[in-house]
Amino acid sequence: MDLVSHPSLRSLHPTGLHPETERRIAVLHGALPFVTCEAATEQDILRCHSVEHVERIRRTQGMLTLDTLCSESTLEAGLVAAGAAIEAVRCGGFALGRPPGHHADRDRAAGFCIFNSIVVAARFAQAELGVGRVAILDWDVHHGNGTQALVAGDPSVLYVSLHQWPFYPWTTGGPDDQSDLRLNIPLAAGTGDAAYLDAFEAAEAAIGAFEPELLLVSAGFDAHVDDPLGGLTLGDATFHELAGRAARLAPRYAAVLEGGYNLETLPRLVRTAQEGFEG
């Protein structure tokens, strides 16, 4: 499984002392080899987001929301991150992009996220690669409310999320937030490896019953015990196990980096998941 990224992501969208920093990509590039992607086109983005949203990102310098920054290079960073996700779908790879995406919905950036790269990649696969049914598995510590909103009501996409709850974004992902094409598995703060892997069996069952042609994984690493922004307590080996089990759920799969804010552990965890996907 190739890692997919671009050298420009080490400098685009600088955020200072914000936890979602360009240093996340710098440490990954320093530790792991990757293949270089091209940026997504704005047309790729517009399969998911509104023209107004793209224009807002183009012209804003400052705070888009209380937790999400925007600068003169944020649009370019978002296009490159989405391009990494698209290339990961093409090659069955793991996209290392930033900003992350799963909190961004059609008209709004939020939770450090600008464009929803994983849904951009899913729509690219359906429009350009002839893929029909797509399952999105999200194991970031936060619920992917943007992803859920973007695919809601579409019978060709299943969304499954395991996440800490109650937790940001607070209003989605609870035990009653379910549908035929949406499985949310909320987990209490402090949940560790054994309970998490037990809960993952429900995700496997739902994805298996859906029979996707393509599985896309929102691979956040902020559920790790040493991450500063989450309250779950997963060890390294669990990410290897999750990736290995995910790879058996569809004939094609790819992964997209979401959260993970400990700069010391992030390269190790990405490599651990990569090895799990590879079997």
Image (cartoon, grey):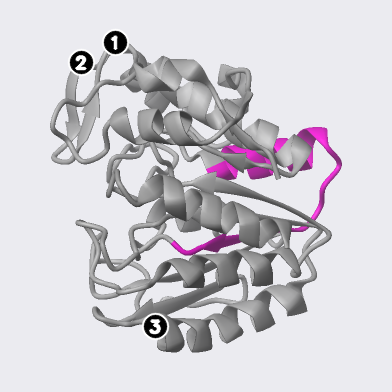
Residue 78 vs residue 273: left or right? left
Q: Position of residue 221 (x, y in %)?
A: 40, 57
Judged by depth in the image, the label closer to the viewer, 1 or 3, is 1
Say what secondary structure mark 1 lies in: loop
- Judging depth in this view, the residue of 8 and 250 nearest the camera is 8
Marks 1/2 in contact by CB < 8 Å: the verdict is: yes
Q: Which residue is mark 2?
A: 61
Q: Position of residue 94 (x, y in %)?
A: 61, 43
Say if the magenta span includes residue 109. no
- Residue in view at x 66 percent, y 45 percent: 122
Work out whether residue 93 can be spotted: yes
User: Magenta segment, which residues?
Assistant: 118-139
Mark 3, other Cα within 10 Å: few <14 / some 14–19 / many ≥20: few
Q: Which residue is mark 3?
A: 176
Q: Quadrant of the C terminus?
A: bottom right
- Judging depth in this view, the residue of 182 and 160 nearest the camera is 160
Residue type beneath disc 3:
Asp
| Marks 1 and 3, how far apart at CA | 40 Å
Residue type beneath disc 1:
Glu
Q: Quadrant of the N terminus?
A: top right
Say what secondary structure mark 2 lies in: loop
